[in-house]
Image (cartoon, rainbow, N blue to C red):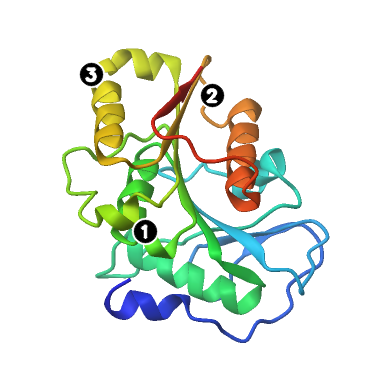
Amino acid sequence: MPGRKSKRLTDRTRQSAPAARATVPATGIADARLFMPQGYEAGYDYPLLVWLADDDGFDLGRVMTRMSLRNFVAVQPGRPHAGEDREDAVWRAIDTIRDRASIHAGRIFLVGRRSAGTEAFRIACRHPDAFGGVVSIGGGFPLEESAFARLRDVRRLPMLLCCLADAARETPERTDRTLRLFHAAGAMLAMRIYPGRRDLSRAVLADVNRWLMDEICGSKPSLQSECAR
């Protein structure tokens, strides 16, 4: 990762965090929220989920409670400071959480909802060596941008796209272009299409949890351009 960004993921002195599940303000990150797993153990390097959301109604604690009480530390970055963009807020959140909790440097995942899912794809593809994977829930891949500029590294980046069936039917050409792009590039994309209208349903979150744990535990190989209904 070039320039100053590469310094943000160096090892730091880790401090203990609360031993019980909680969603609390993350000190040092304006407006950020932090989720600590139930039964937190300071000696274990946890995967970190960095949640990006495009609306103020997103409830990190509720979402993580539905997804997993024990598997992850999670943070929702605060609003960018003046003159910053969302990516700066992401790096600042990661830095601060790694000072407060025991985090595995190779298991940091970006997860975004709706337009923030597209932003998660964008940030992860800019810095593919900084993340263990990226998940978008309802946010399309940024096809019109040079997201594959670092193709060799992006090919090693696992990606998951979850979308509702109605949305996929409304934009079949975009879905087809996305799958064709990943197939041609040899990059890894798993796609899940769901019935209903709730993008943060228990079924969606359970699948995201399984996909993440498969990547973390290496229980199955990632599939290229996989589309499962």
Q: Check the picture and name the quadrant holding the N terminus.
A: bottom left
Mark 1, secondary structure of its residue = helix
Q: Residues within 10 Å of mark 1 (few under 14, many from 20)?
A: many
Residue sitting at 58 percent across and 74 percent down?
98
Residue 108 at x, y percent in the picture:
52, 60
Residue under pointer 2: 198
Residue 229 at x, y percent in the picture:
51, 17
Residue sitting at 76 percent across and 52 percent down?
70
Q: Is residue 99 above or below residue 83?
A: below
Asked if one can make out residue 68 in the rendered structure from this viewpoint, the answer is yes
Residue 153 at x, y percent in the picture:
33, 57
Residue 172 at x, y percent in the picture:
28, 16
- The disc labelled 2 sits on which kind of residue? Arg
Residue under pointer 1: 128
Say whether disc 3 or disc 1 marks the residue closer to the N-terminus.
Answer: 1
In three-dimensional space, the C-alpha distance between marks 1 and 2, rounded to whole angstroms, equals: 29 Å
Residue under pointer 3: 173
Closer to the eye: label 3 or 2? 3
Say whether disc 3 or disc 2 marks the residue closer to the N-terminus.
Answer: 3
- The disc labelled 1 sits on which kind of residue? Pro
In three-dimensional space, the C-alpha distance between marks 3 and 1, rounded to whole angstroms, equals: 26 Å
- The disc labelled 3 sits on which kind of residue? Glu
